[in-house]
Image (cartoon, rainbow, N blue to C red):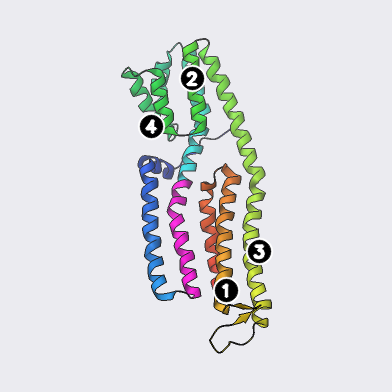
Amino acid sequence: MTLLLRGPIPDLYVSISPKRVWYATWVISLVSALAIFLPSFLIFYPGLTFHYLVGGSVAILLLGPAIVEHFQELRKKRIDNALPLLLNDIGEGQETGMTLLESLREISNRDYGPLSKELKKLVSQLSWGVDFSTAFRSFTSRVGTSMTLKVSILIVEAVNFGGDLKTAFRSTAEFLRELLELRQERQVQLRPFFLVIYVSSLIFDLIVITLYRSFILPLAPPPLADGGVSFLRMPLTLGEFRSILFDMAIIEAFFGGLAAGKFGTGRALSGLKHSVLLMGVAIVVFWAFF
């Protein structure tokens, strides 16, 4: 059986979030990142400290959208988990002889998490005489989950074609429970892949640092007259070499986090929080060893 997740933070997020919050978060994050990047460019470029600060500014740029995306995932999860209970309650109302509108009005006062607010708006629209299909399209657009879209289409078609609605609602609720259980099993099976991504990112950082300290640094000739270092016929200083290795670690952490999000939810943007965390780990590790 799936559980209806509860908690104050997603409800707060729902009350302040549509797309405007997403765009505003990107703007605020971009301004914050530029506030770090521009002074660091003027003061520390092209040293290794500049690269550290650039990596930190990129992490700050992604931090705000990662938080918004995380709460959006929690909201969608709570809505999907509430749908089977909602359909069961509608079916019970049908069994007592209520019409569909009466059943919706009755259950709109119950707690279905973020779904309750949108359900009350749906009942209000239907009470005002809004067309049934139009009201459910508006409801689906506001909720914004693929599972809600499928359920809304099923309800509209069941009402249009008639028949035993209570049986349709009960069977749909059971199907959704099985679908949610399969989703949870998939997430459990994919957890080892998350571990592989995190471990591989950390191993990459340690291998790069080990190669630099054990191979590159001892084999590098003394500084030349112009202040540079000739390494493997490349006119690079050791500082430039460290900067290149650090940039590679940041890039690997960024795309590794996106891959983790793709594994977990099927959406790369949901991996922004993993990217921020892995980039933070890379900055700390390189700062400690370099």
**How many residues crowd mark 3 within 10 Å: few (<14), some (14–19), many (20+)?**
few
Q: CA distance from mark 4 to mark 2?
A: 19 Å
Disc with the residue nearer the chain's start (2 vs 3): 2
Which disc is residue 203 wearing? Answer: 3
Q: CA distance from mark 2 to mark 1?
A: 60 Å
Find out whether residue 54 is within the magenta segment: yes
Q: Are marks 4 and 1 in contact (CB under 8 Å)?
A: no
Amino acid at circle 1: Arg
Q: Which residue is mark 1?
A: 242
Q: Nearer the viewer, mark 1 or mark 3?
A: 1
Q: Are marks 3 and 4 in contact (CB under 8 Å)?
A: no
Q: Which residue is mark 2?
A: 155
Name the secondary structure under disc 2: helix
- Determine whether 101 is above or below 10 in the image: above
Q: Which residues are magenta?
A: 46-70
Q: Which residue is mark 4?
A: 117
Nearer to the camera, 84 or 1: 84
Amino acid at circle 3: Ile
Find out whether residue 136 is within the magenta segment: no
Residue 193: x and y in percent read: 65, 50
Residue 267: x and y in percent read: 54, 43
Residue 16: x and y in percent read: 35, 43
